[in-house]
């Protein structure tokens, strides 16, 4: 794509991921525009933050309602920025909805695995490495084709909060990188796998 990428963002929490993407747009790292923000509930902290930043925010009563608000002619890419509801994936949305998950999928994914629940599960499992995964979204929680992953060590003395901070730092790099590759037309799907063309 040689024109500005038009993004719809879906939030359920504090909106930090949304703010990170917008920061990258404003500093020139992403040639994109967030044209619509959809919140899963009116009282999430991200709604106020998004409106303070000048975004149009709509509240979707359900994942189906959110899908109804999206338009293939208006939105090149849908970014799930901490979105916690099941999203109906219409035909046009295949390969155009991207999510970031705070673990190295397919481990520690699925319904109910979000935020500190994920980090607590990682610590309970005793694995030495965790990270984040950017993937395209399908109808199953956290099972869509993986675009990229970033890893970090699980350190002695970590609790869920400390681990979350380290993983979120990776997310702040990984999600904009994946969005940029999409904007450059470098991502394609073949046999439910993501192919990345060289720059």
Image: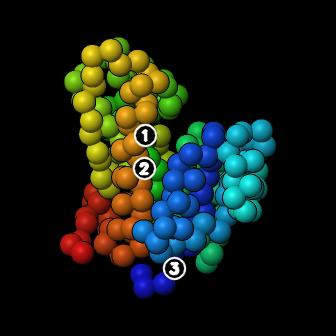
Where residue 109 appears, as percent x and y from the top left, is 40, 33
User: Residue 4 — which label?
Assistant: 3
Tell me if label 2 and label 3 are in contact, CB under 8 Å.
no
Report whether 129 appears left or right of 26.
left
Q: Residue furthest front?
A: 27
Q: Which residue is mark 2?
A: 172
Q: CA distance from mark 1 to mark 3?
A: 26 Å
Tell me if label 2 and label 1 are in contact, CB under 8 Å.
yes
Name the residue rendered at 65%, 68% in the picture: 35
Report how many numbered discs are placed on residues in the image: 3
Q: Which residue is mark 1?
A: 168
Q: Residues within 10 Å of mark 3 (few under 14, many from 20)?
A: few
Give whichever of 145, 98 is nearer the camera.
Answer: 98
Report whether 28 appears left or right of 170.
right
Mark closest to the chain's N terminus, 2 or 3 = 3
- Asked if 125 appears above or below 187 in the picture, the reply is above
Name the residue rendered at 42%, 49% in the picture: 172
Q: Quadrant of residue 190?
A: bottom left
- Secondary structure of the residue carrying numbered label 3: loop
Q: CA distance from mark 2 to mark 1?
A: 6 Å
Tell me if label 1 and label 3 are in contact, CB under 8 Å.
no
């Amino acid at each position: 794509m040689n024109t500005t990428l038009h993004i719809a963002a879906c939030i359920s929490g504090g909106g930090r991921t949304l703010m990170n993407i917008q920061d990258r747009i404003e500093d020139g790292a992403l040639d994109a525009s967030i044209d619509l923000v959809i919140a899963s509930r009116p009282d999430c902290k991200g709604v106020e933050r998004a409106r303070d930043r000048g975004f149009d925010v709509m509240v979707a009563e359900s994942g189906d309602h959110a899908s109804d608000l999206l338009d293939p002619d208006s939105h090149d890419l849908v970014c799930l920025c901490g979105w916690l509801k099941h999203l109906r994936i219409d035909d046009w949305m295949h390969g155009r909805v991207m999510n970031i998950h705070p673990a190295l999928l397919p481990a520690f994914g699925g319904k109910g695995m979000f935020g500190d629940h994920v980090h607590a599960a990682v610590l309970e499992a005793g694995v030495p490495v965790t990270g984040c995964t950017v993937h395209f979204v399908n109808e199953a929680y956290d099972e869509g084709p993986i675009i990229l992953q970033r890893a970090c060590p699980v350190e002695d003395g970590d609790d869920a909060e400390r681990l979350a901070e380290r993983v979120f730092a990776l997310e702040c790099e990984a999600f904009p990188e994946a969005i940029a590759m999409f904007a450059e037309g470098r991502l394609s799907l073949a046999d439910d796998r993501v192919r990345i063309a060289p720059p």
